[in-house]
Every structure is written in C-alpha cells, then in structure tokens.
Amino acid sequence: MTGLVVAMDGPSGSGKSSASRGVARALGLRYLDTGAMYRAVTWWMLQQGVDLGSPSAIAARAGEPVLEIGADPDAPSIAVGGVDVAGPIRSHEVTAAVSAVSAVPEVRSRLVAEQRAVIGAGDIVVEGRDIGTVVAPAAQVKIYLTASAEARAQRRTAELAGSTVEAQRTAMARRDTLDSTRKADPLAMAGDAVELDTTALNLDEVIAEVLRLVKETT
Ligand code: DC
C-alpha cells in the first residue's frame, strides 16, 4: 500500500458517511462505503427468498451476488447483478436484516477481499465497522467515530421520514449489540485508532478535525 488510506469506523449514526465523503472530497481521494456492500448482499438475499434465520443458508449463497460499487465521493453508486440498488439498500427491510447477513463469515470473507481490491494502492477514505482492525490494518489514519445514543438516534430520525427518535434508538441499540457481539470481525475500535466523539460537533467541525488528524499523521 503506497497511497493514503483513511479508515473511518464506528456505529450507525456516528456521522461516518457524511464525514467520510466530505474528507474524501476535501483531499481529492476516492471513497468506499463498505456498509453499502453488506446492504447490497442483504437486498439480494431478500430478493432470492433466502432464509435469513439460517446462517448456513446465507453462507451457501454468499458467493453468488455480483456487486459493482463506485468510489466517487460525489456520486456513490452500488449495483447488484446490474440492478441499481442505491435506494432499496436503505429500506427498513434491508436495515432490519443486514446484521444477520453481515455476521456470516462466508459473506465477510468475500466482501473483505473485494474491499481490499477496491482499496488497491490507496488514496481512499473507507468507512465501515472493521476497516482499521481487519480490512486495512495498515491504514495510515484510523478514526473511530462515536456519539451519544441520543445524538445518533436524532440524526437517523432526521434522515428517515416517518420515524421517531424512540424507535430509532431502539433499532440502533439492537443493531449495535448484534454488530459488536458477533464472532466474525465485530465492530471494535483498533488499538491505534483515534476516537472522535461527534455528539457536540456539526459536520464541518467533524471534517475539520479529521483533516487535522490526517495532516498530523501523514
Ligand atoms: O454503515 P451501515 O449502517 O450502512 O452498515 C450496515 C450494516 O453492515 C451494519 O449494521 C453492520 C454491517 N457492516 C459490517 O459488518 N462491516 C462493515 N465494514 C460495514 C458494515
């Protein structure tokens, strides 16, 4: 790896996506949303009627969906088998099912390999749950974004029409527990990551702080 890799990990609602895209734009880097890949595989499994209560049923089909993911921070794109799924992967149905699919080691190993292929020689900001720990442990900059449960639930509610803060808080707590207690590559902060609490920061402040850390480290 020769170019810069910025690993941005953390739970949902910590502000990872907007901050990662903003940082990539400011530095002229590519951008990879690894969560979108887990969501795309989940969308495909739901379409195929795979029993998501059965890890072995998920594992048996894990290699089938063909993903195409774009790395332009101004126009992130994702398709499965040639179908644009950028909208559908944000549906409630996919969000509720993605933790079960992403806990299956066969799904993770194939997506981690694809993520490493996209990262290639670097010059990229990569967001996810296990980037600093598993996907790109040699990343020069590792940031772990956090925010209070209240702030995270409020941000998600503002993004999604027709939801309440209370419902979001419950759904996010469930997903956090599943993501951080699974056996395969759980959500965790890398030992050499910098923790950034975004509770009291707006987007521009988060981006500025990450840019400062990048400058300091590189
Ligand atoms: O960041 P997101 O909410 O779009 O991620 C969706 C799910 O994908 C998340 O609940 C856990 C999983 N995920 C993962 O296991 N590893 C990653 N690197 C990224 C996401």
Image: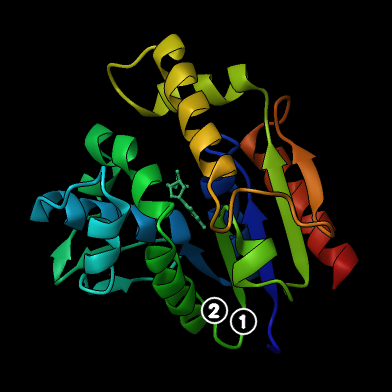
Which label was assigned to residue 119? 2
How many marks are shown on the rendered structure?
2
Q: Residue at x 19, y 55 (%)?
A: 45
Quick check: 112 left or right of 198?
left
Residue 184 visible somewhere in the drawing: yes
Mark 1 near mark 2, Cβ–Cβ under 8 Å?
Answer: yes
The residue lying toward the viewer, choosing from 179 and 12, is 179
**Farthest residue toward the left?**
48
Q: Residue at x 18, y 61 (%)?
A: 84
Give the structural element (helix, strand or loop) at label 1: loop
Q: Return the x and y of residue 170 as percentages of the image width and height.
A: 46, 18
Instruction: Tell me the kind of residue under disc 1.
Output: Gly
Instruction: Tell me the kind of residue under disc 2.
Output: Ile
The residue lying toward the viewer, choosing from 164 and 171, is 171
Q: Residue at x 18, y 47 (%)?
A: 51
Quadrant occupied by the C terminus = bottom right
Q: Residues within 10 Å of mark 2 (few under 14, many from 20)?
A: many
**Which residue matches tag 1?**
122
- Mark 2 C-beta to ligand 1 under 8 Å: no
Q: Residues within 10 Å of mark 1 (few under 14, many from 20)?
A: many
Q: Return the x and y of residue 42 as percentages of the image width and height.
A: 27, 52
Quick check: 182 left or right of 40?
right
In this view, 30 is above or below 58? below
Residue 26 visible somewhere in the drawing: no
Q: Return the x and y of residue 80 as percentages of the image width and height.
A: 20, 66
* Quarter holding residue 37: bottom left
